[in-house]
Image (spheres, rainbow, N blue to C red):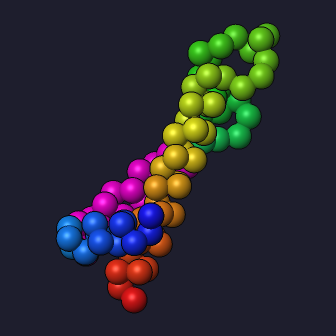
Amino acid sequence: MALVLLDFAHSIGRPAFVFFHFMTALSLIGLVLMHSGRDAGMGGMGYVPASQGGTHIVERNLTRLTIFVGTVFFVNTVILYHLLK
C-alpha cells in the first residue's frame, strides 16, 4: 500500500503534495477553530433545544469531519516525509 502511494506521489510531484498539505492544514485549522466549549460555537447555536441534552448533530458531524481531515493530514505528512527523505 505504501509503495503504491509513493509511486503515485513521485508521478505527481512534490509541489502538488505540498499544495495539498497546505490546503489540508488550513482546513484543519478552520475546523478546529469551529469547535468550542459548552454552549458556544456550532454546538450551541440552537439547532436542538437545550432540553433534549446530549451532543447536537451539527457538533457530531463537525467532529467526524475534523477526524477525517486530521487523518488525511497525517497520511499526507507521512507521504511528504518519504518524498523529501
Could you say which is closer to the camera, residue 24 or residue 9? 9
Residue 14 picture quarter: bottom left
How far across and how far down the image is residue 67, in percent? Answer: 57, 47
Vertical comparison of 51 with 9: above or below: above
Residue at the image position 36 percent from the left and 66 percent from the top: 4
Left or right relative to 65: residue 79: left
Left or right relative to 25: residue 45: right
Main SS of residues in magenta: helix
User: Quick one: quadrant of the C terminus?
Assistant: bottom left
Residue at the image position 63 percent from the left and 31 percent from the top: 60
Say if the magenta span includes residue 67. Answer: no
Instruction: Kindly give the residue lying farthest to the bottom in the view shown.
Output: 85
Residue at the image position 62 percent from the left and 22 percent from the top: 57
Say if the magenta span includes residue 28. Answer: yes
How far across and how far down the image is residue 33, in percent? Answer: 54, 48
Could you say which is closer to the camera, residue 14 or residue 6? 6
**Res. 51 in view:** yes
Could you say which is closer to the camera, residue 69 or residue 4? 4
How far across and how far down the image is residue 19, in percent? Answer: 27, 65
Residue at the image position 70 percent from the left and 11 percent from the top: 49
**Res. 42 in view:** no
User: Quick one: quadrant of the N terminus?
Assistant: bottom left
Magenta extent: 14-33
